Image (spheres, rainbow, N blue to C red):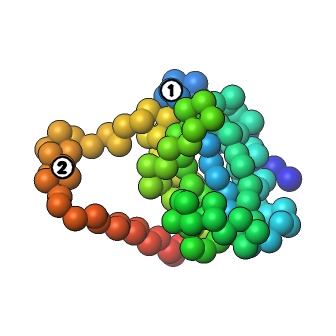
Amino acid sequence: MKLLNDEIVIQLRGVFDSQFNLPVEIIHFSKDDKCDEIVFLLDEISSLTDKLHISHYNLETYPKLAETYAVEQAPCLVVAGRDGDDLIDYGVHFYGLPSGFEFGSLIQGIIQVSRRDSGLIPESRERLKALTQPVHLKVFVTPT
């Protein structure tokens, strides 16, 4: 099953070739082992660069791993940096199928993790350094 048209594939290859720096692992948590659109989408995206790796886990079969990444529901995509055998969770998580505008956000998240840089301006970085307590930020998006 192919979800991305040829034009999108060409654009993604261009973005990955010019902007992908360091390896990234997407850890996909699902509630069942059936093939779904997320699996097809991830396989298509990962075929476009050798710097993107995908791993699939059942949330109920691997509860400790899910807990490691603070994943409580599925489907969930954890976009982590890969450093050899180590994975670095930058807190970039996507819930549900990243389609429509969310697809662009997923690609941007992958690129930011590959750069190991959020792209924030210096003023924002300084304000964040001044925080004294953890902040849990969630962004909810609904199709319209």
Tell me which label, 2 or 1, sits earlier in the chain.
Answer: 1
Q: Mark 2 near mark 1, Cβ–Cβ under 8 Å?
A: no
Going by the image, does 119 lie left or right of 40? Answer: left
Q: Nearer the viewer, mark 2 or mark 1?
A: 2
Three-letter amino acid code at the position of disc 2:
Lys
On the image, the x and y values in percent for residue 143 come to: 53, 73
Residue at position x 60%, y 30% in the image: 84
On the image, the x and y values in percent for residue 122 come to: 17, 39
On the image, the x and y values in percent for residue 55 come to: 72, 49
Residue at position x 28%, y 64% in the image: 134
Going by the image, does 71 lie left or right of 133? Answer: right
Three-letter amino acid code at the position of disc 1:
Asn
Residue at position x 53%, y 29% in the image: 22
Instruction: Say which residue label 1 marks.
Output: 21
Q: Residue 129 carries which label?
A: 2
Quadrant of the rendered structure where residue 31 is? bottom right
